[in-house]
Amino acid sequence: MPMFQSIKFRLIGLGILIIVAGIGLRLFFALPFAQGLLRDEVAAQQFSMASYVARDIDHSIQARRALLTELSSALPPALLSQPQQLTAWLRERQRINPLFNSGLLVVPPDGKGVLAQYPTVPGREELLFSASDWFRAALHADTPVMGRPKRGRAIHEPILVMAVPVRNAARQVVAVLAGVVVLNTPGFLDRLQETKLGVSGGFLLVSPADKLFVGASDPAMVLTPTPPPGVNLLHDRAMAGYRGTGITINAKGVEELSAMVTVPSTGWFVVARIPTAEVFHPINAMLGFYLRNTLVILAGMITLMLLLLPRTLRPLTDAAHAMRDMADGKRALAPLPVQRRDEVGSLVLGFNYLVERLRDKEVALKASEARMAFMAHHDTLTGLCNRAMLEDRLQQAMARAQRDGSHFALLFCDLDNFKPINDAFGHEAGDAILRQVAARLLDERRSTDTVARLGGDEFVILLTDLGDARAASVGVAGQLLAAIGIPFNVDGRLFELSASIGIALYTQAGISTSQLMSQADIAMYQAKRAGKNEFCVFDETLEPFRV
């Protein structure tokens, strides 16, 4: 019988054909799918990073605007005719809050030179500011204005000028107070300019109105014009107002994955960009590894089949029968014994591995379902119950109270003066404090009680199965105030907080969950009006009832 008509040859040929076709189909469908997943994941991370940088820049701008507003209001007009005293006044303000690292200056209404400046920059007193955009805008504004980013005429570095008018009692502009900040100064744009994404990616800060790169990870791009329309289509969309992610070809012909986020107070937008070659490098490397190893395995398989196929056909048939019995339900799904270390053994090992993976996937699926169920009913920051879970527990408590006549109480807890800490020290410090608050609220709670976070710095404690609802809730409220009053330690820094707690008691039917929440909320505001660090029990008179 010719060799090509033998079952061995046909099996080898069929095996080769199946392997090659399987590899081709997997690469044809799986590779684009994997690239899409990786692109979406990286795009989401870039958008988050761009959002963080944009918020940081916006906070820096707002802080400097607020400082100028405060200084313009506090500047005594009488000092405008006393240069030395005015310089001393500027020096003291700069020492207290040095947000403008290139100095503060007071310019007369005609824009010729300066009345005073600190620190002194040589040559600045001889400049003519009447043609500067920020100076002209400040003369007609009531709030701080911001000029076009440019290279300073006196210090020859990229700068940004903010200015605000100084008015006399008759609301006439008697001077313009300006602050100058170097763009790459620490705490302003240095993070954007020093942070890299991958090997060659980075950030851009773009001013659409000025068609200018305000900042960039590449120093050579700072204060350079943006590309003309048609060079970068995604950039054109971003200049027109698009914010999000996308893939584009930059001016150098490199394909990039970019994310755009607005800096709200300026009209600028931040771009986080990275070449797609770096994004897809892991997949391309895995593809090469996969192809090389597949070729090696294919060659070894053909050799083994040519040598050992006649002897292995019988065990293969036995294994196939066993697998068929398992598929038909005649035999329990279980690993098969490996009697020989050959292709049949490899097939059996592969089947056993599949059985293990199926079991692992089943366990992982159950764990994933449990995690999803937890996330659906709990706050992601603190792990406390969320609003939906609280509503469910509240409905259960109300039904139980109506059924057996038990009582329960609802405590609405709002942190006092938390926002200033969050604004001054950032969301990371605020989040750390909220997690510690959650831990203290849970301390000494019973398994039947519920502690939930509604959002921000608002928490609710549900106390169920109470004999004397008033006495029990008042005792818990006092314990909570004492616990929250203990200073919070965040990275070695101590923060002192207090809380205002409103208590609503359920002692009779006829009230809904929303009404009970509203009563607790009203009582909480009564506690705040009573001086904070207090708790109040709701009563029908709507007046604070201090216990």
Image: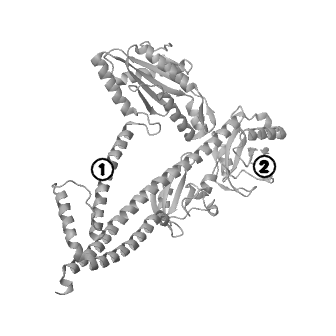
**What's the residue type where badge 2 is placed?**
Gly
Residue 362's disc number = 1
| Residue drawn 22% across the image and 79% down it | 8
| Residue drawn 34% across the image and 68% down it | 27
| Residue drawn 34% across the image and 76% down it | 300
Q: Is residue 172 visible?
A: no
Q: Position of residue 311 (x, y in %)?
A: 23, 75
Camera-side residue: 25 or 333?
333
**What's the residue type where badge 1 is placed?**
Glu
Residue lying farthest to the front in this orientation: 339
Asked where in the image residue 497 lies, by quadrant, the reply is top right
Q: How many marks?
A: 2
Camera-side residue: 19 or 168?
19
In this rendering, the answer to whether 22 lies above or below 413 is: below
Look at the numbered disc 2 and give the secondary structure of its residue.
Answer: loop
| Label 2 neighbour load within 10 Å: few <14, some 14-19, many 20+ | some
Q: Is residue 208 left or right of residue 220?
A: left
N-term mark: 1 or 2: 2
Residue for badge 2: 113
Camera-side residue: 409 or 137?
409
Distance from label 1 to label 2 (Cα)? 77 Å
Q: Is residue 393 left or right of residue 59?
A: left
| Label 1 neighbour load within 10 Å: few <14, some 14-19, many 20+ | few
Q: Is residue 13 left or right of residue 467?
A: left
